[in-house]
Each structure stands twice: as C-alpha cells, then as structure tokens.
Amino acid sequence: MATAADNSPQPANGARRSEDTIEYVFYDGYWIRYYAPLEDTLANRKRLIDSLTRRAFHHTEAGINTPGKSLDLARAAYESETDPQRKRVNAAMLAGALFNRATDLFTSIVDLGELGVQVSHSNELMRECSDCFQEALTLGKQVKHHSGCEGIDEVWGEPFKAFTMPVGDFYRSRFVKIAQSMRDIDLVADCMIEVFCGRALFAEIRELIVDYATAARQIAETMKKDPVIFHVWPNFVALGEQLDAFKPALAEDSDQMLRMRVAYGRDLIQEGRRLIGYIASARVPMPKSSQAYIEKCQRYNRASLP
C-alpha cells in the first residue's frame, strides 16, 4: 500500500487501518505495513539491538565488523593514522569495534538480569555501554554504504536509538524512516519514467518501473521474519532482473552516436534500479545518492534521443 488518495484528506501520522486482514499505519503520505512493538524488556531490547547491529554491518562497507575485544587495537590504529583516506577506514573499523563492544556489554547486563542481578542505568557497565554506542554513532559519519554511494548514518544510528529510546518510540521512528525511504524510491522511479518513458526506444518499460517501485516499497515495509517475505522478495528480484535485461530495439542501420546514447540510457536505468534496491533493502532514505542520480538523468535528458 502506498500513498493516500490524492483527493482525500491525509490522515494524521500514526493513524491505522486494516485491509484484507493486514494492518497499516500512516506516516508522511504513506500507508505502511504495521508491526506491533515488542514488549519493552531487557531481553527483547537485546534481541532488537543484536538484530539492528547485524543489519548495520550488512548494509555497510566490508571489513569494518571489528570484534569488541579488539577495541584498543582499533583505537590505536585510528589515532596513529595520518593519511586521510586510510584514517576514514580506520574510523569505520573503530566504530565497528565500539558497536560490538556495546552489544557485548549489553549481553552481559541481560545475562546478569536473568540471574536476578539488577543493573541500574547509573551502573558502570550501563554507562560504558552507552558511551560505546554514542562514540560509534559519532564515528558512523565515516562509514559508507556497501555500494560506496554515500554514508548511511540512519542505519548506523539505529542500535543506539534502540538502546536509549522506549521500544514503542523506536518503532515509531522506524515507520517515519520507512515513509522517507518510500518517498526516495518514488522520486527515483518518477525520474526514470520522466526521462526515459517519453522516448520511443524506452517507452515500454514504464509499467516495469512502476511495478518495481511498488515491489521496492513492499520490501521497505516488510520485516524479514514475516512469512510474506517469501512472496514479495522473489517478485522484487524478478522485476529487477527484467529491468536489467531490457534492451531497446535499435534499427540495424542506427548510427554510432545513437547506439552510444541508448547504451548509456540502459546504464542509467540499471543504476536507478540498483539505487532503488539499496534504499528498499536498507529501509532508510539515501538523499545524496538520489539527488545525484536525478541530476545525472537530467543531464542525459538534455540531449536529443528518439
């Protein structure tokens, strides 16, 4: 389910409704599949933080999932490095070590709680856990998405938010980010349609782009533990493969310049497909990459092409 009807007044953020036994919540122009927050216990919070930490490393650049026990080594390497490019990578590795140290500490706190030992928020373990998350969040500005497109602070900051915010508030913040992700998906898809689908050689992919954007929004709103993922994910991948496989039908006597422009157009369509996929999978907006892509398409659009 996507945007609210154009001619109807928009519901308030947080409004809910059901359709075909599925519950949706409304945020910033989009109806999003609703998942109820977990009960706010230490054990549930630990599961949430563990899941978010794995997700952060999954969507970020390789080589930065530094074990928490290597924190001192990671810090020493970061502090001694002078080359700016290498220092950025060392900062990302240190951020990874801090995240893992924080999750290690929180695991210990939960284990103590299960043994009947209550750890207060002012306890040294809890303070160190908070400090590690906070420093990891600050260094997270140096961490890139695995594509290299841009930083992905929104994903990197989620374990810290889950540590500091009530679980219900964290879920609400996630719905907002999903709505923003859907907005970026639609911006990129609309740009692709505007630039390419008015041209005879690319006109037939309009419906495919629309379907792919719809599938991407479904991926953005669907939790991996939901059994529906076994239907929406294959559909999303198959539509992406169809977009990648699209080849405009060129006349055999087409000149070299036209062939080059068509080839570059195909490259741009595939780049847009990848960007939509990155946003949908990470479930956070990627505004810098989206804007850069739109500007690239607009430059392409200024040249004439059938």
Image (tube, rainbow, N blue to C red):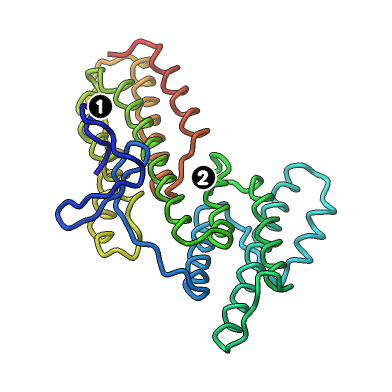
Q: Is residue 52 left or right of residue 211?
A: right
Seen at 67% across and 53% down, the residue is: 92
Q: Position of residue 303 (x, y in %)?
A: 39, 11
User: Disc count in the image?
Assistant: 2
Q: Are marks 1 and 2 in contact (CB under 8 Å)?
A: no
Q: Is residue 223 visible?
A: yes
Label at residue 16: none
**Helix, strand or loop under label 1:** loop
Please, what is the three-letter code of the amino acid marked with disc 2? Answer: Ser
Q: CA distance from mark 1 to mark 2?
A: 27 Å
Name the amino acid, label 1: Pro
**Residue at the spot 27% in from the left edge and 45% down from the top edge:** 215
Residue at 66 percent across and 70 percent down: it is 121
- Whether residue 274 is visible here, answered yes or no, is no
Q: Earlier in the sequence, mark 1 or mark 2?
A: 2
Q: Which residue is mark 2?
A: 147
Q: Which residue is mark 1?
A: 248
| The C terminus lies in quadrant | top left
Find residue 273 and report its horizontal and vertical position in percent: 36, 38
Q: Is residue 280 left or right of residue 80?
A: left
